[in-house]
């Protein structure tokens, strides 16, 4: 159960890391697979990679802004992300983007549904854009430990990480611990909005996107409907003027992925978002989530009752070192 301790980074992995830094797709894929893996031996390689990155801050100076897109299936998240990536790459000649799409597992094959991958087909030729689809097993399209682990690596390699998840309750709650900014993507006509209000989900996102606003009339009515819902719930500070052309001031974006409306405004907003300064808090949240998944409330209570209060809050211990200590703690109670 316990993880072996830190090893030096093997030359073969160092070479992959160097190539991944140059955004070569095959080494990137290999590294993400390693990061997604739950085998203890792989955790050691992961730790060695992180140690190497920490020791070479000049070579790994990037700190990606992580952006989440969540919302009901069919709202147009994948289409919107594809348009956004295209626009960001056009507007900025240097920006690099990694997209992580989390697909609910296919009941039949246990693999990811292919639809989302094919829509971003131009990604193969564009070196500044990397696309990865993650199966989400039974977690219904939510962020998993694999997403967290992939982000741990990708944040050192890209300027932006875009995560697409299916929004169903718990997912919104988990995704906010990973992202710097979360968008809730909705369709026009109030159905989604009323549903979300009921679940209390409206409190989670930093901004709202009403997609499929193909016509101006629809954009205008969607804006007023959402604005009045938000006003009622007093969730966001609304701008004095209720002008749908200035909806971004209310953190409401009106887009059409098929007619390319509102994408540029959304893109400008994204390009100026700052990146996270408290990544270790994200690590602590996902470490606790992983312990809870494996050992339930028993595991969590051992962490909270642990006299070494510094354990999780330490910013000098690596994720794997913390995990090892927590596992040792649990092991000592099981014996
Ligand atoms: N009319 C219209 N259809 C859209 C728009 N964006 C996406 N769609 C369509 O909505 C469907 C679902 O889109 P998709 O991007 O897969 O949604 P996701 O499940 O949220 O990722 C597809 O048939 C898209 O072509 C839009 O802005 N306007
Ligand atoms: Mg999708």
Image (tube, grey):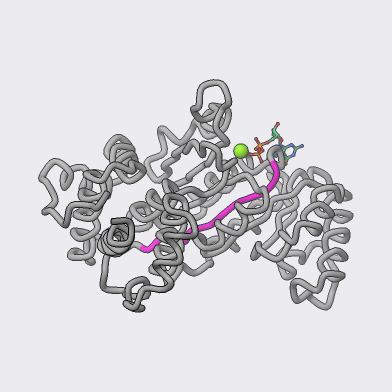
- Whether the magenta-drawn stretch holds residue 64 is answered as yes
Which residues make up the magenta segment?
Answer: 63-72
Residue 239 as seen in the image, left or right of residue 275: right
Please, which residue is most extreme toward the top here? 108
| Residue 107, above or below 300 | above
Counting labels gives 0
Quadrant in the rendering for residue 331? bottom left
- How far across and how far down the image is residue 42, in percent? 25, 44
Residue 99 as seen in the image, left or right of residue 315: right
Quadrant in the rendering for residue 31? top left
Image quadrant of ligand 1?
Answer: top right
- How far across and how far down the image is residue 328, in percent? 27, 60
Q: Please say whether residue 283 is visible from this viewpoint.
A: yes
| Residue 44, above or below 182 | above
Judging depth in this view, the residue of 176 and 15 nearest the camera is 176
Judging depth in this view, the residue of 63 and 175 nearest the camera is 175
Judging depth in this view, the residue of 35 and 253 nearest the camera is 35
- How far across and how far down the image is residue 36, in percent? 36, 43
Q: Residue at x 25, y 46 (%)?
A: 40
| Residue 296, above or below 31 | below
Q: Residue at x 47, y 37 (%)?
A: 133
Where is the C terminus found, in terms of image quarters?
Answer: bottom left
Q: Please say whether residue 93 is visible from this viewpoint.
A: no
Residue 38 as seen in the image, left or right of residue 219: left
Residue 169 as seen in the image, left or right of residue 15: right
Judging depth in this view, the residue of 119 and 113 nearest the camera is 113
Quadrant in the rendering for residue 222? bottom right
Q: Residue at x 53, y 67 (%)?
A: 272
- How far across and how far down the image is residue 217, in percent? 89, 50
- Whether the magenta-drawn stretch holds residue 187 is answered as no
Q: Residue at x 75, y 54 (%)?
A: 254
């Amino acid at each position: 159960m316990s993880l072996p301790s830190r090893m030096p980074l093997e030359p073969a992995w160092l070479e992959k890391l160097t190539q991944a830094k140059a955004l070569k797709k095959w080494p990137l894929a290999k590294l993400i697979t390693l990061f997604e893996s739950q085998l203890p031996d792989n955790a050691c390689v992961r730790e060695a990679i992180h140690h190497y990155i920490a020791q070479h801050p000049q070579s790994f100076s990037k700190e990606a802004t992580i952006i989440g897109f969540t919302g009901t299936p069919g709202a147009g998240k994948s289409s919107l992300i594809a348009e956004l990536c295209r626009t960001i790459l056009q507007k900025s000649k240097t920006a690099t983007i990694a997209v992580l799409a989390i697909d609910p597992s296919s009941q039949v094959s246990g693999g990811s549904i292919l639809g989302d991958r094919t829509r971003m087909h131009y990604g193969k030729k564009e070196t500044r854009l990397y696309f990865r689809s993650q199966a989400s097993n039974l977690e219904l399209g939510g962020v998993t430990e694999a997403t967290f682990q992939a982000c741990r690596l990708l944040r050192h390699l890209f300027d932006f990480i875009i995560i697409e998840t299916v929004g169903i309750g718990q997912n919104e709650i988990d995704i906010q611990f990973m992202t710097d900014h979360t968008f809730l993507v909705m369709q026009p006509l109030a159905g989604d909005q009323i549903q979300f209000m009921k679940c209390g989900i409206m409190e989670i996102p930093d901004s709202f996107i009403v997609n499929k606003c193909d016509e101006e009339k629809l954009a205008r009515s969607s804006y007023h409907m959402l604005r009045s819902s938000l006003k009622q719930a007093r969730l966001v500070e609304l701008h004095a003027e209720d002008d749908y052309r200035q909806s971004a001031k209310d953190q409401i974006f009106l887009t059409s992925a098929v007619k390319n409306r509102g994408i540029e405004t959304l893109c400008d907003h994204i390009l100026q978002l700052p990146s996270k300064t408290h990544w270790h808090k994200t690590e602590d949240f996902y470490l606790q989530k992983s312990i809870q998944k494996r050992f339930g409330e028993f595991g969590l209570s051992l962490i909270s009752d642990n006299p070494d209060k510094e354990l999780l809050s330490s910013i000098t211990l690596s994720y794997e070192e913390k995990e090892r200590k927590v596992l040792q703690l649990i092991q000592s109670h099981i014996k």
